[in-house]
Every structure is written in C-alpha cells, then in structure tokens.
Image (cartoon, rainbow, N blue to C red):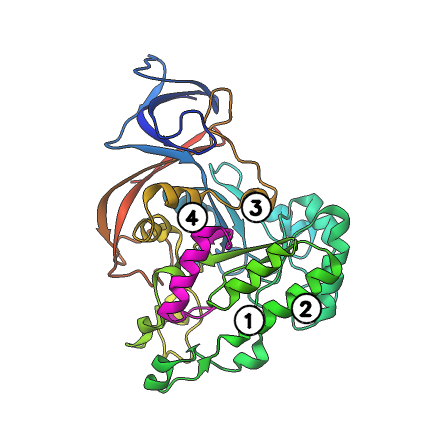
Amino acid sequence: MNILIKAAKILDLSSPHHNTIQDIFIIDGVIQKIGKKLSFSDAKQISFKNLHVSQGWFDSSVSFGEPGYEERETIAHGLAVAAMSGFTHIALNTNTNPMPDSRADIAFLLEQANGSPVHLYPKARITIADSDSKLAPLRELQLTGAVCFSNHKSALKNANVLKLALQYTNDFNGLIESFSFNQDMANSGVMHEGAVSTSLGLTGIPSVVEEMQIKRDLDILKYTNGKLHIPTLSTKNAVPLIKQAKKAGLNISTSVSIHNLFFNDNSLQDFNSNAKLLPPLREQADSKALKQALKDGIIDMVTSDHQPLNSELKYVELDLAHHGSIGLEHSFGSLLSIFNVSDTVDILTRGKERFGITSSTIQESAKADLTLFSPDGKQIVTKKTIKSTSKNSIFIDQELPGKVFGVFAQNKLYLAD
C-alpha cells in the first residue's frame, strides 16, 4: 500500500521534522520520503484541513467484553473504536470470562486482533482466576504475549502474593500492575467521601483507601526491587508518595484516567450513574493536583480506562450500578480541553516503553505508526455520536474540542467516518 499524507503538521519531539508542515510518503508501511510538495501518481492521497500527525497513541488500560461479555463490546469492534479515536496501541485488561491466566487465553486475544491497524497487548492475571493466592504461570504468559500482569480492579489483599509476584518477575523483567484500593476500608462506598456524598446521603469511599494501599505496595516494591505499575491514581496525597518513591530510585510507574482529570465528585449531584467510577471521582483539588503531576511527569501516562457496560448494569439505582465509563472516543478532546495540543500529544504517546513497546519516530526509513488529527472544531457528545457498542459515557452532553481523522499502522489505514 502506497500512501501520501499531504501538508501535515508533524508533532513528534523525537523527529527532526517536529513542528513543521510536511508531506509524508509511505510504501508498505515504511516512511520513504518526508518533504514539501511531494507527488506520486500511484499513492492514495490523504488530505484534511489543518491536518496534524503524531506517533500513534497508547492507552494502558482498556476493557472490552470478549470473551464472555460480547454484548458490551467485541474485540473487533473495540479495536475499530480505538482506531477511530486515534490509538494504535492498547493494553487490554483482564476483566473477561474466562480471565486470561493461561497461554491459550493470551493466544486467543492476540488472534482476535489479526487484521487490525491497532496493536493489542493483552495483560494476564497475577493469580489464577479462581484464587487470590496462587500465582499464574507468569513467565509462560509473558512468552505467549502478555505485556504485564494484573488482577485489574481486584486489589491484591494478600501482601505476600504481591511480594512473590514482584520477586518472581524480576528474573525476566516482568511488570506487575497493582490497583491501589483497600476494599476493607472502602466497604460498600458508592462515591468519594466528602461534602457531596454527605449532602446526597451516600456512603463514601475515603481517599485513604488508595493512599494506604500505595504505601504498602511501595514498601513491598522497595523490599523486592521489582517493577511495579500503579494504575489510575485519584487522590492528591498519592502524588507526593509517588514522587518520593521515584526520587528514592524505585522502579515505579503510574497512570491517571481522563475521568479523574476532567471531572470531580460534583458530577454525581444528580445521581448520574455514568459518573460512578472506580477509583471514584474525587474533589476539585485532587483533579488539579493530578493534572500538574501528569504535566510534570510524576504521573507517567494517561488512560481512558475504557469500560463498556450494557444498560442493564449501568442505568439502575446508583447503589446497584456497576462502576465504569467508556473513554476511548473522548480521550483526545478531554485532554485538549485541559492542555495545549503539544502537551496533549506528548501525554497520549507516553507509556509505551514501560510496557515493552517500541516507539516509532516520524522520520524516513522508520515504520509508519501514525495518528491523524486536528485541534480544530468542537463536538457535543451524545449517545448518537458514540461509536462504542455500550453508551455508558460520563462525557454525554459535554462539548469537546478537536477531531481525530484516523490512524495508519501495521501497513493499514483506518479513517473515521
């Protein structure tokens, strides 16, 4: 496939063409020529108003439904949503049925991604699916294609399990992901514990459930000298804990979800079940601290924390509603409403190396792994504009800037609309 991208502003800090407007000529998935006013008669030409191009975007925490919950989102459809949202790399969570704790499970997930421009990187369980204490065959799972090991949002209660997992994966540079949430302290909380939960008469989840778990996990990390990723920070007091750990030389990385950057607990004032998330939306001061930590690099990466749920699970009484919101489609617009376009692109392309994924610089002779977008335009999110199978989006009725045109990756072009 020959592709000619016309008059695109390149945003790639690692590229010699950063912040310049260029044509990009691609043959069989490799960038052959970058220059002005290029012309090739045998190439498919791509041209959009105020077109911008960056390295392909990465999301470290994506859930679909397959296998087991295909009514929420199949892998094929989910990957199409990822592509139209600008992502060329996604790490797939373990909240499926069956949960991926065997080589066959990982092989199945990889097979479903064949033919997509989006690279799918499956996570595997830390423990086998029917146990909270018996480790899965971690090395086998990594060799089959698992990018890290995670029990998703089922926090590891047993500290010894985390210790053993970190020690064992040291031998092959494996990455352990540990969700920071003390379920005993959270009890049956519905939302963040604060003034809003009190005014609504709802049971709250205090910030300390996250912070005490982070402290425990960092102590174990220090003891084992392992490699740990803590996903979806939500509290301001978590930031100095991570900053101090990095300063001490611990091998730690973190992420934050777009939801905890864009929204706060006021979003539940009308008992909106789409705003029931895990971790919960916190206060405005937490959101402000997380934004700054992301910009400063204390938080390493952002995630959509995409969690499709069918209406029977979401549009019920708040106490009964499941946690989660979709987010892939709204990642670019939500970040662009907070940061400038250069910072937004930098944030969306972070985190690949942490998960063992090689980035591809926009330069001649490099593999083309590209996201095509424009910072121009605005769109109000409605159920009709949402392309995901499930429509449980906290962003409904929000006006978001920017437009994603599509992606080119794995020698495949995907254009939205």
For residue 130, the mark is 2
The residue singled out by tag 4 in the image is 77
Identity of the residue drawn at 31% across and 60% down: 395
Q: Quadrant of the N terminus?
A: top left
The numbered mark, 3 or 4, whose residue comes first in the sequence reads 4
Tag 1, which secondary structure?
Answer: helix
Residue carrying label 3? 121
Q: Residues within 10 Å of mark 1 (few under 14, many from 20)?
A: many
Q: Are marks 1 and 3 in contact (CB under 8 Å)?
A: no
Which span is picked out in magenta? 275-302
Spatial distance from mark 4 to mark 1, Cα to Cα? Answer: 36 Å
Characterize the local packing of mark 3: few (<14), some (14-19) or many (20 or more) Cα atoms within 10 angstroms: many
**Does 154 appear above or below 7?**
below
Q: Nearer the viewer, mark 1 or mark 2?
A: 1
* Tag in front: 3 or 4: 3
Q: Number of callouts in the render? A: 4
Image quarter of the C terminus: top left
The mark closer to the camera, 2 or 3, is 3
